[in-house]
Every structure is written in C-alpha cells, then in structure tokens.
Image (spheres, rainbow, N blue to C red):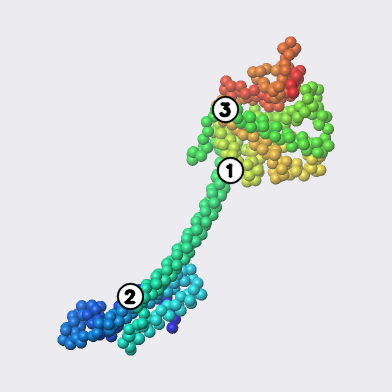
C-alpha cells in the first residue's frame, strides 16, 4: 500500500482529524470487549446510543469479579489506551514528515515518509483486529512501567515532529536569505542604473544647453555665484597646468630632449635662480596656449547656434563639473567642448614633440580628424582642457562677466596684481624692483575683486 498517490488530494489534509476520531472508535471497540468498563464505553458513544446502552446495562445482571482480576483488566485497559494514542501520535509525526518532504520536493524523503505512514497505519489496524478477536489478558509488566513506556514513545514521536518542524523552518530561513541576497543584487543593479541615468542626464543637459539658453526647470542645477567659487576654480586650473607639465617634461627627458634649450626657446634670456625653475617655462607655454581666446565668449571656437546667455554658461559649467571629460566626448565628440579640446591639443603639443614621444603622428592625425583617443597622454590633456573650459564657462556666468588680464615679460612686479610662484624670495629694497620673466597664470577681475596673476620674477634671491 502506498500513500504517494493520495498526498495531492485535498481530502488528505484533514487526515489527522480523522485519525483522532479513529482512535476514539478503537477505544470504543476495546471497551465493548471489556466486561469491566461498560459505563466508560458508553460515555464514548453519541448521546442517543449512550442512553440506550445504559438502559440495556441496567436490565442485565452484574456478576461481581475478583478484585485482583478487575485490577489487572483495568491496567491492561489503561496500557492499551496509551498504546492507541501513542500510535496515533506516531502516525501524525509520520504524516508531517511526508508533508515536509514535498517542500522542497525530495523523492527519497517522500518514499521514506510514505513507508513510515503505511507502517503506522498497519500498527493501528493490527491493534484493532487484535482486540476484536481476542479478549486482552493481563500483562506481566506493571501499570507504572506500561504508562512510562507509552509516555516515552509519545515524547519520541513529538521529538520527531519538532525535528521536522525545525528543518522546515531552516528551509524557510534559507529561502528568506536567498531572497535577501537577490534583493541586494537588485538594489546594486538599480544603483548602477541610477548612476548611469544621472550621467546621461548631465550629458543631455550639457549638449542641449550648448544649442539653446533654456534653464533647468527640474531644479537639478543650483549654485551661488560668488568670488570664492571662481577663486577655487582658478586654483583648480592652475593645478591642472602644473599637473600636465610633469608628464610632458618627463616624456621630453625620455625622448632625449635638451630641456635647457627647450626652455630657452619658449622664453629666451630668462635668468633662473635655480636650474629646476626652468619648469616654469613649460608651465608658461601651456598657460599661454590654453588661455588664448579666453576673453571671447566663444573662446574663439566656431560653432553654430552658440548662445550668449548667462544661464546657459552656468548650466554648462554645472553639467560638466562632475563628469569625466572622456565620457562626454565619447557620446558627443563634435560638441563645442570637443572642438575646444582638439584646437588646444594641436597648439600645446608641437608635432616634433609628439613625434619624439610616440615615433609617429598617428595620435595627432586622429585628433585633427575629429577623434579623441583613449591614450593616457591624451586623457591627461583632457583633464587640463576641462579645467580651463570650466573656468571660462563660469567666468561668463557672472553679471558682469569676469575679465582676464595678462602680464607681459619685463613688467615691474606689483603686489596688487601679481603673486610670485616662488614663496621664499629675498628682495633688496635698495635695488630695482623685480621684473616679470614669465607669466605662469593670468589674473582676473571679478567685480571689485582682483585675483592675482602668477609670475616668475628675476632679480631676486631665493632661500633654501
């Protein structure tokens, strides 16, 4: 006999309740077979049947039995009651195991549980037939031993039931953990998509504001235009010039360039306090090329439909500020920013210099052709270009616009408009005022505020 075909039917679920009723029926059968307990058996029957039984028993004669035999019969009766309920508890435990084997579905566990259920049903069936065919005899064991053994078996059955429930809860816990991990992965994917959408939104904001002067109605971009904001942007541009000059000088050294001759070709007859100061000649060269055209709103870049709205300049500044320039150029290489990067690269990096670096002009030709290579050198240049472009966009966001001023070589040093790039200077008051040899960074007027230009001076002494 197998219960596997029954587990999928809806009427199998109330089996436990049926088994409880079946257990009561077995008790009735047993009580009917015991001459010492007719009244107790009658109490187990329905009300109408019970009254009929009582009337029948009252009409019969009662034959007294010896006290010892009655006691033994009572002990046997109690032992069998415990046995019946113990078997029913075991059957309930087996049935729970059978249910647990279906979630998750485990064929081997289902087979084992099925056999266990069938075995318990057989035990109950054998018990029923035994009491129908035989009048129980007094057992040899004591009443207390029988009850103790029955209680032990019942507790063991309950323990099995609890073990099944614990395994079921553990399985549910594992499922919940799996769901949590899956939700965490979904959150990570959502965060990545959100970051990508924000980046695309900024890119779209940059490209659209190059062609029209509409503001951002979503309220995404807001900033207070203050001299401090512009000053910090100037500092970032000055640092970018310094940072790009380092790999440029190192590549010139690696290519075998004479740095002294190269510095003199940029600005001849400069008297340097130290040989290491010749790096300022290269920074001055980069500065002069990058800021050429800064005084124009277009930055000397030709573009169709270029607007002159203050708001559009600010929106371009905010859209580009937090983005990787290579990402912007990858999506829109022919934007006005892309044209700015191409025009500045070809004037900052001389063809002879590039040929000595890479052995050819492939990168230069690629840039002139409208591309933006992903080489480390060009990416370093894009950081510089971005900082200068941001400074220009911010300068024309102010009302009135920020004005740029440059210092010519040979000009007399002024502490109001100039700042020396050398901090440890010794100036002799009896001698002539120091002269400007190189301008490393231009200066700016923003309203009534002056942002000093950075210069390299001659005619001064430097402390170690």
Q: Residue furthest bottom?
A: 133
Q: State left or right for residue 176 relative to residue 436.
A: left
Dot 3 corresponds to which residue?
Answer: 228
Residue beneath the point at 82% across and 29% down: 260
SS at badge 3: helix
- How far across and down, in percent of the image, does residue 234 sit? 63, 29
The quadrant of the rendering that contains the N terminus is bottom left
Dot 1 corresponds to which residue?
Answer: 203
Residue beneath the point at 72% across and 37% down: 345
Mark 3 or 1, closer to the camera: 3
Residue beneath the point at 53% across and 33% down: 223
Mark 2 or 3, closer to the camera: 2
- How far across and down, in percent of the image, does residue 232 sit? 60, 30
Of 29 and 313, which appears nearest the observer? Answer: 29
Give the vertical position of 235 relative to 12 (above or below): above
Report how far apart the C-alphas of labels 3 and 1 lie in the structure. 26 Å
The quadrant of the rendering that contains the C terminus is top right
Q: Quadrant of residue 332?
A: top right
- How far across and down, in percent of the image, does residue 385 sit? 67, 36
**Residue 297 visible in rendering:** no
Q: Earlier in the sequence, mark 3 or mark 1?
A: 1
Residue beneath the point at 52% across and 52% down: 187
Report how far apart the C-alphas of labels 2 and 3 lie in the structure. 86 Å
SS at badge 1: helix
Give the vertical position of 155 relative to 351 (above or below): below
């Amino acid at each position: 006999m197998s219960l596997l075909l029954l587990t999928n039917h809806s009427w199998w679920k109330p089996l436990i309740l049926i088994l409880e009723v079946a257990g009561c029926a077995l008790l009735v059968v047993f009580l009917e077979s015991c001459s010492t307990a007719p009244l107790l058996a009658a109490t187990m029957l329905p009300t109408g049947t019970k009254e009929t039984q009582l009337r029948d028993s009252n009409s019969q004669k009662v034959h007294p039995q010896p006290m010892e035999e009655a006691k033994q019969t009572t002990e046997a009766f109690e032992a069998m009651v415990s046995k019946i309920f113990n078997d029913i508890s075991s059957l309930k435990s087996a049935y729970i195991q059978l249910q647990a084997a279906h979630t998750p579905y485990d064929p081997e566990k289902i087979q084992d549980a099925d056999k266990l259920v069938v075995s318990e049903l057989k035990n109950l069936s054998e018990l029923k037939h035994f009491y129908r065919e035989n009048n129980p005899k007094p057992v040899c064991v004591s009443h207390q031993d029988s009850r103790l053994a029955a209680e032990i078996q019942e507790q063991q059955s309950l323990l099995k039931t609890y073990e099944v429930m614990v395994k079921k809860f553990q399985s549910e816990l594992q499922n919940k953990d799996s769901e949590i991990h899956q939700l965490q992965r979904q959150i990570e994917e959502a965060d990545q998509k959100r970051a990508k959408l924000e980046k695309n939104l900024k890119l779209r904001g940059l490209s659209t504001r190059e062609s029209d002067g509409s503001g951002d109605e979503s309220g995404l971009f807001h900033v207070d235009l203050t001299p401090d904001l512009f000053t910090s942007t100037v500092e970032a541009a000055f640092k970018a010039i310094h940072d790009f000059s380092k790999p440029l000088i190192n590549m010139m050294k690696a290519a075998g360039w004479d740095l002294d001759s190269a510095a003199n070709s940029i600005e001849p007859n400069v008297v340097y306090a130290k040989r290491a100061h010749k790096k300022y000649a290269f920074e001055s060269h980069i500065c002069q090329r990058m800021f050429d055209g800064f005084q124009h709103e277009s930055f000397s870049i030709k573009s169709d439909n270029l607007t002159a709205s203050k708001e559009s300049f600010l929106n371009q500044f905010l859209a580009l500020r937090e983005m990787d320039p290579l990402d912007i150029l990858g999506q829109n290489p022919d934007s006005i920013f892309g044209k700015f990067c191409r025009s500045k690269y070809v004037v900052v990096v001389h063809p002879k210099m590039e040929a000595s670096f890479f052995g050819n002009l492939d990168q230069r030709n690629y840039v002139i052709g409208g591309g933006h290579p992903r080489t480390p050198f060009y990416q370093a240049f894009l950081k510089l270009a971005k900082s200068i472009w941001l400074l220009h966009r911010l300068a024309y966001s102010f009302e009135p616009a920020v004005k740029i001023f440059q210092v010519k070589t040979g000009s007399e040093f002024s502490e109001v408009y100039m700042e020396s790039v050398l901090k440890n200077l010794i100036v002799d008051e009896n001698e002539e005022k120091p002269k400007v040899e190189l301008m490393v960074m231009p200066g700016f007027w923003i309203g009534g505020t002056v942002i000093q230009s950075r210069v390299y001076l001659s005619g001064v002494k430097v402390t170690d």
